[in-house]
Amino acid sequence: KNQVEQSPQSLIILEGKNCTLQCNYTVSPFSNLRWYKQDTGRGPVSLTIMTFSENTKSNGRYTATLDADTKQSSLHITASQLSDSASYICVASGSNTGKLIFGQGTTLQVKP
Amino acid sequence: DGGITQSPKYLFRKEGQNVTLSCEQNLNHDAMYWYRQDPGQGLRLIYYSQIVNDFQKGDIAEGYSVSREKKESFPLTVTSAQKNPTAFYLCASSIGTDVYEQYFGPGTRLTVT
């Protein structure tokens, strides 16, 4: 069964600290892995898209990594800001359908 | 100002009534999608359309209907047959399927009582 699991479910950190969110997927055959940021009550916004041949991709203070062998991805946030408080969603796509499989998200709260 | 618009932001209906959610995009994208988001769950695909006048069912299409008469518009109707319609509905579009980025609208929160 194609699925995406994220951990932790929620996380609280202090402003200025770094954090790493984890994602495990079992989508096969695999095409690409995406990370989205979703503010409360808003639509998701894309942070990164990585194909199976890419190991890492950055978008400002956000760095995503991908290990296609172990089917794991992580999103590292550097020097967190209050505006980073949001839900972060990991999404895997299968190469035979192009269909997106969404994780349940990790809710990050950054406190001053 | 390009992007995807959804209206209204909040929608309230009585049980047994059909309701139509609007989704418009001016990005000239061929593909459009409707997702449903419930607390603690990942987004689930309701319907998608790769081209005008064509659409396919997603994972949870029962109780929903769509149309794609124009490239810019992809309205979703939540019918009375949908057993649990209260949810956050998100529309998205992309240039095509597969590795292309999907751009999401701001969402419509539907409450049925």
Image (spheres, rainbow, N blue to C red):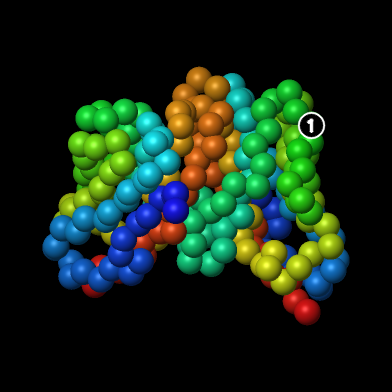
Q: What's the residue type where badge 1 is placed?
A: Asn
- Residue located farthest toward the front when viewing the structure as drawn: B1
Quadrant in which the C terminus of chain A is drawn? bottom right
Image height of A88 relative to A70, above or below: below
Task: Residue at 61% x, 55% y: name it.
Answer: A37
Local crowd at mark 1 within 10 Å, few (<14), some, or many (≥20)? Answer: few
Looking at the rendering, which quadrant does residue B108 occupy? Answer: bottom left
Identify the chain of the residue marked 1, using the numbered disc in the image: A
Please determine whether, in this image, residue B8 is positioned above or below residue B51: below
Residue at point 59% right, 36% down? A92
Which residue is more in the foreground, A7 or A44? Answer: A44
Q: Name the residue tied to disc 1.
A: A55
Q: Residue at x 27, y 56 (%)?
A: B21
**Secondary structure at numbered mark 1:** loop
- Dividing the picture into quadrants, the one containing residue A77 is bottom right
Instruction: Name the spot of residue B5 as percent of width and height, x first.
Output: 37, 55
Image spot of residue A53 (x, y percent) = 73, 23
Q: Nearest the camera: A37 or B37?
A: A37
Q: Tell me: A10 left or right of B6.
A: right
Residue B113 appearing in the image: yes
| A69 sits left or right of B106 in the view | right
Q: Is residue B29 left or right of residue A50?
A: left
Any part of residue B86 in sight: no
Q: Residue at x 76, y 68 (%)?
A: A81
The location of residue B33, given as percent across then percent down, is 38, 41
Q: Is residue B5 above or below residue A16?
A: above
Say how many tags the image has: 1
